[in-house]
Image (spheres, helix red, strand yellow):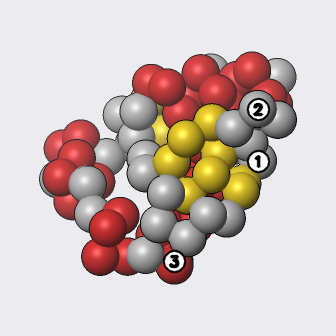
Amino acid sequence: MAGNVDESGGYTCQECGETLANGGELDSHMESEHPDLAERPERSDPAHRDDFVCEECDRRFDTEANLDEHQAEAH
């Protein structure tokens, strides 16, 4: 993730300065606005994609940190 958490708890893109609400939104922003910088080896390897599953809703995540963030916000 290419960003820093600001004083309001939002995530600021280091490339363009846009502030997003959470790390997932920053990841999506990076993929859509800065695709050349968003490449992550673990996302291109199907063996490591979506390894973390929420037991509450079965949503899948590529990192444990993203799963933890989802669980804290959604459940």
Tell me, yes or no, whether the two marked residues, 2 and 3, touch with CB atoms within 8 Å: no
Side (left or right) of 54 relative to 45: right
Element under label 3?
helix
Element under label 2?
loop
Q: Amino acid at mark 3?
A: Ser
- For the question of whether residue 64 can be seen, the reply is yes
Compute the Cα span from label 2 to label 1. 12 Å
Tell me the mark number nearer the camera, choosing from 2 and 1: 2
**Few, some or many C-alpha atoms within 10 Å of disc 1 (few <14, some 14-19, many ≥20)?**
few
Relative depth, front residue between 17 and 38: 17
Q: Amino acid at mark 1?
A: Ala
Side (left or right) of 2 relative to 27: left
- For the question of whether residue 60 can be seen, the reply is no
Judging by the rendered image, the residue that carries numbered circle 3 is 32
Tell me the mark number nearer the camera, choosing from 2 and 3: 2
**Few, some or many C-alpha atoms within 10 Å of disc 2 (few <14, some 14-19, many ≥20)?**
few
Q: Quadrant of the C terminus?
A: top right
Q: Position of residue 48 (x, y in %)?
A: 24, 41
Label drawn at residue 7: 2
Q: Position of residue 58 (x, y in %)?
A: 61, 35
The image quadrant that residue 64 belongs to is top left
Compute the Cα span from label 2 to label 3. 25 Å
Tell me, yes or no, whether the two marked residues, 2 and 1, touch with CB atoms within 8 Å: no
Relative depth, front residue between 1 and 55: 1
Judging by the rendered image, the residue that carries numbered circle 1 is 21
Residue at horizontal 62 percent and vertical 52 percent from the top: 12
Element under label 1?
loop
Q: Position of residue 42 (x, y in %)?
A: 22, 47
Residue at horizontal 76 percent and vertical 32 percent from the top: 7
**Few, some or many C-alpha atoms within 10 Å of disc 3 (few <14, some 14-19, many ≥20)?**
few
